[in-house]
């Protein structure tokens, strides 16, 4: 099944780096999201970010608990992010943590792609299955 729609981000909270040496910095960031479209939900994302002396080389890993309604089914689930920018070549994987679904989303599996438009607007495409 496929779910699509826009989402908004807010409450970006970057803490001072917890490890900063030799030009490589590790820090914590949290933010909230509101999903619209086929997924009407809210979430809080907890990121660990890494910056390097090369501006185009950085990464983050994150976990995000999503709570709401996915195409008529109410519950929660957790996704894990793994993002890398290698001198500007970017990769991002956002996948459902197996068996993290609750309520009517128990058995949820899938991956989400995120797009940021030239105007800065965010959208998602969520390719998922729901095991009974």
Image (cartoon, helix red, strand yellow):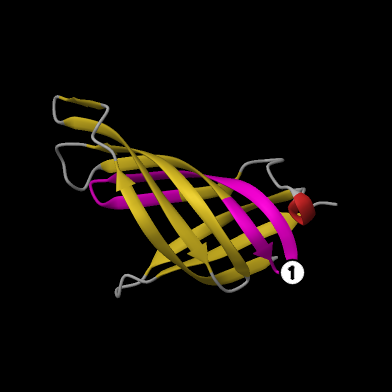
Answer with left or right where residue 66 lies relative to residue 72: left
Q: Nearer the viewer, residue 129 or 30?
A: 30
Q: Residue at x 58, y 74 (%)?
A: 37
Residue in view at x 71 percent, y 55 percent: 75
Rendered view: 104 above or below 62 = below
- Splitting the image into 4 quarters, where does residue 116 fall? bottom left
Label 1 environment density (alpha carbons within 10 Å; few <14, some 14–19, many ≥20): few
- Secondary structure beneath dot 1 equals loop
Residue 45: x, y in percent? Answer: 46, 47
Confirm whether the magenta stretch covers residue 74. Answer: yes
> How far across and how far down the image is residue 39, in percent?
61, 66
Above-or-below relation of 25 to 71: above
Which residue is nearer to you in this view: 30 or 82? 30
User: Quick one: 90 or 5, which is closer to the camera?
Assistant: 5
Direction from residue 83 to residue 70 in the image, left or right: right
15 shown above or below 122: above
Along the line of sight, which residue is nearer the eye, 99 or 12?
A: 12
Check the picture and name the quadrant holding the N terminus: bottom right
User: Percent x, y for residue 52?
Assistant: 20, 36
Q: Residue at x 30, y 75 (%)?
A: 119
Q: Residue at x 20, y 30 (%)?
A: 24
The residue pinned by badge 1 equals 72
**Does the magenta run of residues contain 120?**
no
The image position of residue 21, as x and y in percent, is 16, 24
**Range of the magenta residues?**
66-92
The outermost residue toward the right is: 132
Query: What's the magenta bit mostly, secondary-structure-wise?
Result: strand
Q: Toward which corner of the image does residue 69 lie, by quadrant?
A: bottom right
């Amino acid at each position: 099944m496929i779910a699509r729609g826009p989402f908004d981000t807010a409450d970006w909270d970057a803490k001072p780096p917890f490890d900063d040496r030799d030009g490589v910095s590790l820090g914590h960031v949290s933010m909230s999201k509101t999903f619209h479209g086929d997924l009407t939900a809210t979430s809080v994302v907890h990121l660990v970010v890494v910056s390097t002396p090369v501006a185009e080389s950085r990464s983050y890993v994150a976990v995000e608990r999503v709570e709401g309604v996915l195409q008529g089914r109410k519950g929660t689930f957790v996704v894990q992010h793994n993002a890398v920018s290698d001198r500007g070549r970017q990769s991002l994987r956002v996948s459902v943590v197996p068996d993290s679904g609750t309520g009517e989303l128990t058995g949820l599996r899938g991956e989400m792609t995120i797009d940021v438009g030239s105007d800065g607007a965010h959208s998602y495409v969520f390719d998922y299955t729901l095991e009974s």
